[in-house]
Image: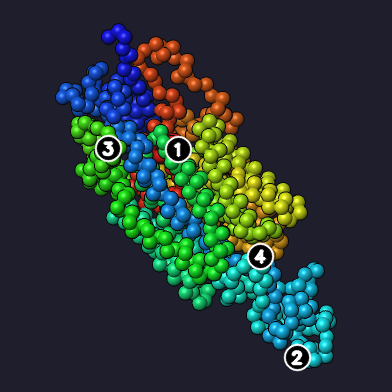
Amino acid sequence: MEGQAKPAYFVNEAFNHEEHPHGGGGGGGADNLHRRKSGGTTKELQLDLGQKKGQDLTGNSGDNGSLPNIDFDDILPLIGEFGRYQKILFICMIPFSFFVAFVYFSQIFLTLIPEQHWCHVPELDGLDVEARLALSIPMMNGEYNNCYMYDVNYTEIMAQGKVMADPKWPKVKCRHGWSYNYTEIPYSTVATEQNWVCDDAALPTYAQSIFFLGAIVGGLLFGWVADRYGRIPALIGTNLIGLFAGVGTAFANSFWEFAAMRFFVGFAFDNCFTMMYILVLEYVGPKYRTFVANMSIAIFFTGAACLLPWIAYFVADWKWLTIVTSAPLLLAVFTPLIVPESARWLVAQGKVDKAISILKKLERRNGRQVPAQTYQHFADSCRRMREQEAQNGSYSVLDLFKSPRLRRTTLLLIVIWMAISLVFDGHVRNVGSLGLDIFFTFTVACFTELPADTLLTVTLDRFGRRWLACGSMVASGVFSLLATVVPVGVYSAALAIMGRFFVNISYNIGLQWAAEVLPTVVRAQAVAFIHIMGYVASIIAPFVVYLANISPALPLIILGLLGIFGGLLSLLLPETLNHDLPQTLTDGEEFGRGQSIWDFPCLAKQVDEDDESRRNTDVEVRSQAFVRGTQTGASLTASTGGELRSSILRRSVKSRNSTKL
């Protein structure tokens, strides 16, 4: 009718490929197209699956047997991609972001040891610090030795009126413990109370590595719980273990008691946040997932990490610090009152009706109206996809090593991710060796997460994964090495923090990249395996930082070389931006073949813009970025259950291009 605008039809060509999981992108005509039709109001948005123009889901005609699959990303725009209810869920991520930051970083402040500590000599307690040091502690390289004292009769020395030690006096290891200068670190820690210094200086390092062992075991355990009993029980269980073990840490009276508690606290890392993170992303539409995924880390996690050192500073008691940072995990028991169970997990368990009831709840909360026929088509699609998942379940991670190119890609991903993990965790724990106040330095270093995530959100879908990963890793390595050639203090700390900034970018890219490069049929197990290998590297990281006891420059040298090495290796991986992601093992073997190392996605020509015929019709073809993003979402459907089987996947779905769980 003249005078009225024609309804716009949007064709998503991505679904031509998704209907051919074994072909990697076959043809397909109109029957394979999803059309989204915009009506008069947004509240009446409908999904047109009819075979004739003008026939929608409310109609009674059409061949339902030939209808394409409707997945969550198709139905979310109908119930609201980021409506009132999703905004509430986004806010609910705040406490869990704090939990994971406290669980991850708190041990740093539980085991701090002042740089100035010396043998305690009871006979000299009546003297001031300088007098005690001058009389009892030998000098080494112009500084008082931390681990030795003079082996003399101090009662006689005092009676003789001597005020300065003779360097020729015999020396012996500390006999009566140590005295600590609490000027810079104004409280006693478990390490100072139990004297984890000198011969026992490696004990905090061992405890940190034991923590990561617990993270691996906890990831496997609660991944199984999540698959068997649901995401909400797993979320509550992992937080409660973190609560009890964290509070129990305050009552540890020996290293092994402390290490045992840290092992169980490791169960909560990073499961205490991952389950909630994925649950929220499931109910947010593709258009908003980039914001929700990145900003939940950039704002909430960063805020918690920046706040933690000042909580430690003002609480000024390591036992109360463990209680203050662990007790809030109890809030997780109230999660079921607000957060729904994973609808995707319910579908995987065959509980489609329960999943639909949750979607209807979101629909009501967001003030939307979705025809009942839409839910029926969705239910039918879920059953078909579940059958497809069952067929894909016969593959294992070993299949990745049976063909040469896929084996090479897998090994590269493992090595690169181990390098990224080690460099990231090494920078996190090396802040105490930068020559500045650790509370301030830690805050500034953690704050780099905010600009790093924000920059990545803007640039990742323009410049691609490969060159951004290479550039950020190499930059991290270069800044780390530069920090070793400048004076210790402000300059070295600033350069090291820049190294931390760039490895933050690499970390986020790496988490997503692995999920995109690996084929759908084995993606879940493979990504979980790669992340476990990353935790193996994290176990090593505390020992790299411990090398600062030999030379403050050694950790940064190792982190710098590893960063450059990992960055250059990343150039050997295929680019995934604007490419259909591999679904079968054959797709994975062929993926990236023909790509040049010098290919830059930002310079690629957008073919869609040159198709004059499409511009002259009522059908608007979605941009390549949208097509690829939707394909990525659909290609991850088959691995829904498996990806959550390893709750180590903290941020493996941070972008719109890797968000289908």
**Mark toward the viewer: 4 or 2:** 4
Q: Which residue is mark 4?
A: 184
What residue sits right under mark 2 in the picture? 155
57 displayed left or right of 443? left
The residue at 49%/63% (across/down) is: 211
Q: Secondary structure at mark 4?
A: loop
The three-letter amino acid code for the residue at tag 2 is Thr
Identify which residue, 495 or 581, lies in the foreground: 495
Mark 2 or mark 3, earlier in chain? 2
Residue under the image location 68 percent in, 48 percent down: 495
Going by the numbered disc 1, the residue's amino acid type is: Thr
Q: Which percent across, then down, holds residue 362?
A: 28, 40
Nearer to us of marks 2 and 1 is 2
The C terminus lies in quadrant: top left
Please name the residue shown 43% across and 50% down the image: 94
Q: Please name the residue that numbered disc 3 is placed on.
A: 363
Contact check, label 2 and label 1, Cβ < 8 Å: no
Is 401 located above or below residue 628 in the figure?
A: below
What crowding class fits label 4: few (fewer than 14 Cα within 10 Å), some (14-19), or many (20 or more)? few
Identify residue for label 1.
290
Q: Position of residue 224 (x, y in %)?
A: 34, 56
Q: Are marks 4 and 2 in contact (CB under 8 Å)?
A: no
Residue extending farthest to the front is 314
Note whether residue 451 is visible: yes
Q: CA distance from mark 2 to mark 1?
A: 70 Å
Of circles 4 and 1, which is in front?
Answer: 4
For the residues labelled 4 and 3, the Cα–Cα distance comes to 55 Å
Viewer-nearest residue: 282 or 605:
282
Q: Secondary structure at mark 2?
A: helix
The colour scheme of the drawn protein is rainbow
